[in-house]
Amino acid sequence: MSIDIFIRSYPKDFFLLNYCLHSIKKFVKGYRDIVLVVRNKNYEQLLQDVDISNVKVIISHDFDDSIDYCGQQICKLYANIWSDAEYFFYVDSDCIFYDTFDIREKYFDENKNIILFKEYWHNLQSDSFVWQGCLRELDLLTEFETMRRLPQIYPSRILSPIRSLIENKTGKDYINGCLDIYKKVSFSEFNIMGSYILLYDQKNINMMLYDPKYNQIPCKQFWSHEKREILLEQICKLLLL
């Protein structure tokens, strides 16, 4: 079983990315490579700001800042273009791990089936319903929302079929198809992946109703818009630095 950690970052998160990478190397077990994707125009700044030792850096599309929220989602669905891993453990660059854990033990059951979570839409707050738009556009809407546990892990085998589905449903190439959906309604890469699995790829998947007490992950997400001094204090306390 090969698992790569996949991170797509941008300059506002580079400060946090340093601690994210440090925490991965210190605490996370069971992965092969760290794959870090940045836009071409951000690469030089990455080299100046971030310690990328033992990290596989991929230079990607130069999405404009105004659409890069969707741009980073587009890149996550491109992961198998840049890596031949069987699974991708998607980590945001503002996530910090603070205790030892093994991805293979937390995200797979005793039969080595990947564990994913779902929740009925009607049990969620209404602001979650915005993600239904992209699922309707792709005929992937089910009674479940699937973005339930972060970080997320998904099998690479679903990515190429999802990109083909987006092209077929929009009549455009993959990137422009994603952007059209994003501008029209919304875009949620993790709900798209989860719903696709529910409908077309349930074999070797253990998808259960969400339980917040199940296999909690020692990971805390920070926000780059907070003051750096406050972030640094919180992170150092978390990592005992």
Image: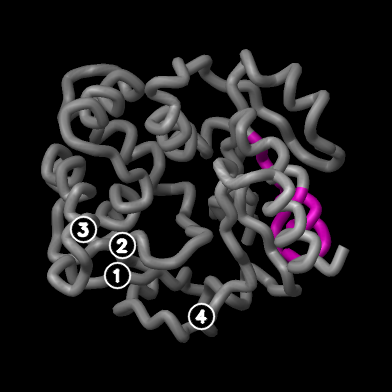
- Give me the disc on residue 91: none
Q: Tell me which residue sits at (25%, 56%) in the image.
A: 195
Question: Which circle's residue, 3 or 4, is located before the other in the chain?
Answer: 4
Looking at the picture, how far across and down is residue 199, in whole percent?
21, 58
Question: Between disc 4 and disc 1, whose residue precedes?
Answer: 4
Residue stretch in magenta? 19-36
Residue 24 in percent (x, y) is at: 74, 57
- In the rendering, which numbered label is found on residue 146? 2
Per the image, label 4 sits on a secondary structure element best described as loop
The residue under label 3 is 199
Label 3 crowd bin: few (<14), some (14–19), many (20+), radius 10 Å: few
Q: Which residue in the protein does label 4 denote?
A: 109
46 vs 34, nearest the viewer? 46
Q: Image quarter for residue 15?
A: top right
Q: What residue is shown with label 1?
A: 118
Residue at 75% x, 17% y: name it. Answer: 44
Q: Amino acid at mark 4?
A: Asp
Of callouts 2 and 4, which one flags the residue occurring earlier in the amino acid sequence? Answer: 4
Q: The residue tagged with tag 2: helix, strand or loop?
A: loop
CA distance separating discs 2 and 3 = 12 Å
Disc 3 versus disc 1: distance between alpha carbons?
A: 13 Å
Q: Residues within 10 Å of mark 2 (few under 14, many from 20)?
A: many
Q: Quadrant of residue 96?
A: bottom right
Alpha-carbon span between mark 2 and mark 4? 18 Å
